[in-house]
Amino acid sequence: MRIAILGGTGQIGAVISRELQLKFSEAEILSCSRSGKGVNGFSFNVYQKDWTVLGKLDVLINAVGIIEEKGENTFQKIHVGIVNKMVVEREKLGNPKIIHISVLGSNKDSPSKYAFTKGIADNIIKTQENWVIIRPSFVCTSGTTIVQKVKMLHKISKISFGLLPIPAHFLTAKFQPVMGEDVAHICIESIRQNLSEKVIYATGSEFYTLEDWLRTIGKGRIRLVKIPKWLIDRPFRLLIRVIPQIMNTDQYLLLGEDNTHNNAEMIKILGRRPLYTKQFWEDELV
């Protein structure tokens, strides 16, 4: 069996590559990235014209994605463009099963460009045969974006003597983070069970809010100043345009909405409950 993972050295892709190697030790696994570094590293640029260098594949996993736009790397180019290229090149690769790592909340009607382009990409995949789309909530990998944002808010609270003004709706939105290993194991089971034309929601066993994470990192010493959405919305949007390091517009939109989903189908596929993430948050934030 031959498996290629696009974005194989990224935060999610690296976990998938590692877990696949453990489960399919006899398989030839191509962990694709421009550098070609790492275990099973294979130098490959998704924008190159010739994809036949990948050879005939049994499985093609797309773990490429960005959380914010930088320069020419737009959501449209990364999320939609690469999926379009996969569809065009698929026949040359032997029509492999496609496993596409999307995101919980992907929706072509979303006001968030991030979620919108993820939704468009999902719809393109659905025009094909023999595919699996995995839609995870926040994926717990070291240094992930949400961890960075919580650490940044903690620093701001230190500068302001323990006070942290924050949009109130940020603190009520519920999240259901999932361990990276669980996402990888869904990929494994999608191959083992020969799943096809299936959307799998990957959500964890616990629910959290941003306030929970701020309590963890601040050890209860951060005093939150909750500002109503009607009062903070416009000023905050202007602030993050001036100081984009705080967060971008898409992150602002997503932090204010619930990111949860029933995980019964995931449990059925894995044959177990999702891994608990409590230790991850304590390790990353404390």
Image (cartoon, grey):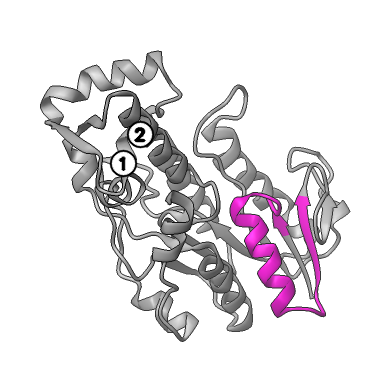
Query: Which residue appears at 34% of the width and 77% of the height?
Result: 264
Q: Which mark is residue 255?
A: 1
Element assignment for label 2: helix
Indicate left or right for 195 with 267 as reference: right
Q: Which mark is residue 153?
A: 2
Report the magenta residues as a range: 5-32
Q: Is residue 180 above or below residue 112?
A: below
**Residue 236 or residue 196, whichever sits in front:** 236
Mark 2 / mark 1, whichever is N-terminal: 2
Residue 6 part of the magenta segment: yes
Q: Does residue 20 appear in the picture of this structure?
A: yes
Of badges 2 and 1, the one in the foreground is 2
Query: Which residue appears at 59% of the width and 55% of the height?
Result: 12
Where residue 193 appears, as percent x and y from the top left, is: 58, 83
Q: Residue furthest bottom?
A: 271
Q: Is residue 24 above or below residue 167?
A: below
Where residue 172 appears, as percent x and y from the top left, is: 19, 47
